[in-house]
Amino acid sequence: MTKDDWGRPQAMAIPKEGYFTLEKGRYGPTYPRTPACHGFTLIAKIKPGTEEEIRNYGKRLEKALEGSPDVLAPLQLHYLRWVLFDIGSDKYFMYQGIFDTDFDKYTEDAVALFAQMGINTIFEKLEGFPDDWKTNAPAFIKFVREHQCPSFLEYGEYPYVTAVEIKKALRLKKAFSDMLDQMQ
Amino acid sequence: MLELGDIQHFLLTRTPALAARYEFLTFRQPSAGRQWLAGVIDKVGTGKSVGAASPDSRWVTVAFTWNGLEALGLEEASLATFPEEFRQGLAARAEIIGTTGANHPDHWVGELASPALHAIVILFTRDVAERERCKQEHGLYLSGIRGVDVISTLDLEAIPPFGCAHEHFGYRDRLSQFAIEGTDEQAQPGSGPPVKAGEFFLGYLDESGSQPPLPQPELLARNGSYLAYLRIEEHVGKFRDFLRQQSDTSEGQELIAAKLMGRWRSGAPLVLAPQRDDPALGADMQRTNDFNYRTIDPYGYSCPIGSHIRRMNPRDTAENIERRKMIRRGGTYGPPLPEDTAEDGVERGIAAFIGCASLVRQFEFAMNVWINDPTFKGLGNERDPFVGTQDGTFDMTIPKRPIRRKIVGLPAFTTIRGGAYFFLPGIRALRFLAGSR
């Protein structure tokens, strides 16, 4: 079984630490690529009374992407899921991203993009988020790492396939369809 | 305003040096280290005293490891404010920057991975005779100070022809030069707008539009920079053998050499001269750097995605590129290998410094991602063909219509023989370090 075998669904059970062997990245351990690609699940408590603002930001991001759909391209994302949920009387925010880059490698690019997109307006509502994040990227990265909850299982129906490869395949399919149309 | 009179000249000016010497020092007592430093500060050139038309015949630079700052007696509260990567040092970060296998610090020379490495004196001279004179003078000075020892040295010399800088593989060097905001340097066409000084010197606004927190006290940090040092041996005989294996004709060999680098050995970039060399273009500083990739060569048919220059500066195909600029200094060491001579086993290569304001964001990013990430730009199994850690298990793809050419199992043309992180303080900071505590 190889990583190239996209036709064979695979699952990976991951140790508690989030990795099998410690591989040091610039800002801490690096996490493995799994059949469900790279990703992170960030869970943090929100500051009381900020729920509405966070929800409204969802609308803002939707609008921003309508205007410039490629704006998140540098993050090489497949999917983002943002969830607000309760634990007892506290409200928590979950940011789950599935993407094709090793987070440690492009972490400053992500921080820069978050600032440019105003995504920081959500992070600033999270308890413990560093006030000086703009000038202190390492503190921002430390916060993200401290709130990252590694998966203990990840599954891919089409394992290890990148978003770029999926889009290439769909473009190729479209090109073939167009060609066949022209042959009629 | 840049305080040019306080910043060491090293990252501000390329001096017309044809020879150099690096001396790596250890301080056995803090007072001895301070005594030594106090006597050399006046010889250190500044951004103000060393201009492009410097009449000097030698230029001195002084920098310290974190262990060196401690060995000078800097107090704990101050030492703790330096960034973690600098405190750990380059050798401890080997896995992160990808200097593994044959490049691992276990195999380094010159005691560079040792905690006893405290300081470096970088001497650039107009010629070898002047270097020898300065070498003697510094030796004499050191002999009068008990407690400062030289743990290793490296002599460097430019290799002919001397009209322009080359490295041992025969590629023209020092072709790309951006400008720093607040200096008189003019940016070459294609090098982008002037870069904010805070990307290279501590205490100034950087490209984020703000000023990052400084190590303390501010007097020590301000006008300082970090240097990453790498001593890179070049296996010239092996490189030439490889080219001969790849093609029977000299034209074919030159094309492979160009595809690995992204430029012909003349310096002419493949993006602008995809079919054949154009030495006039290579030598024309107004044109040789004036290109991009995104629209002219998106798939790398001219300049492969994995070629050295496209990895080291992806130009308009990378995000956040203004935060990844670095200043390179250094030179070649060892005798050139004559064209028709087999590998002679003599060490030769490049001993270079990369100057920046954040080792983790600039230098380590370049090493970790641009140079050693096998999946860079979707490539899959490649590393930088010249400075990546190669062990015969990585490939090099040369896009070509209709079918690409893939070199499987690229050999290692270089070996990293040493490295270290240094802090390059401003002149006031040097005086502070030399003062008694």
Image (cartoon, grey):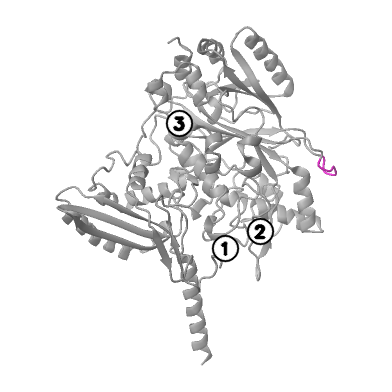
Q: Is residue A128 left or right of residue B20?
A: left
Judged by depth in the image, the label closer to the viewer, 1 or 2, is 1
Split into 4 quadrants, where in the image is the C terminus of chain B? top left
Nearest to N terminus: mark 1 or mark 2: 2
Q: Please name the residue that numbered disc 1 is placed on.
A: B299
Q: Secondary structure at mark 3?
A: loop
Q: Secondary structure at mark 2?
A: loop
Q: Please name the residue that numbered disc 2 is placed on.
A: B274
Q: Is residue B355 above or below residue B266?
A: above
Specify the principal SS of the magenta part: loop
- Using the image, name the chain to which the residue with label 3 belongs: B
Nearest to N terminus: mark 3 or mark 2: 3
The residue lying at 47 percent from left, 55 percent from top is A32
Nearest to N terminus: mark 3 or mark 1: 3
User: Which residues are the magenta region?
Assistant: B338-343
> Few, some or many C-alpha atoms within 10 Å of disc 2 (few <14, some 14-19, many ≥20)?
some
- Using the image, name the chain to which the residue with label 2 belongs: B
Q: Secondary structure at mark 1?
A: loop
Give whichever of B247, B67 is nearer the camera.
B67
Q: Is residue B263 above or below residue B212?
A: below
Q: Is residue B19 left or right of residue A82?
A: right
Q: Report the disc number at residue B201.
A: 3
Can you give x and y, in whole percent of width and height, for residue B331 in the image? 66, 33
Can you give x and y, in whole percent of width and height, for residue B58 in the image? 64, 20
Which quadrant of the figure has residue B404? bottom right
The residue lying at 73 percent from left, 36 percent from top is B348
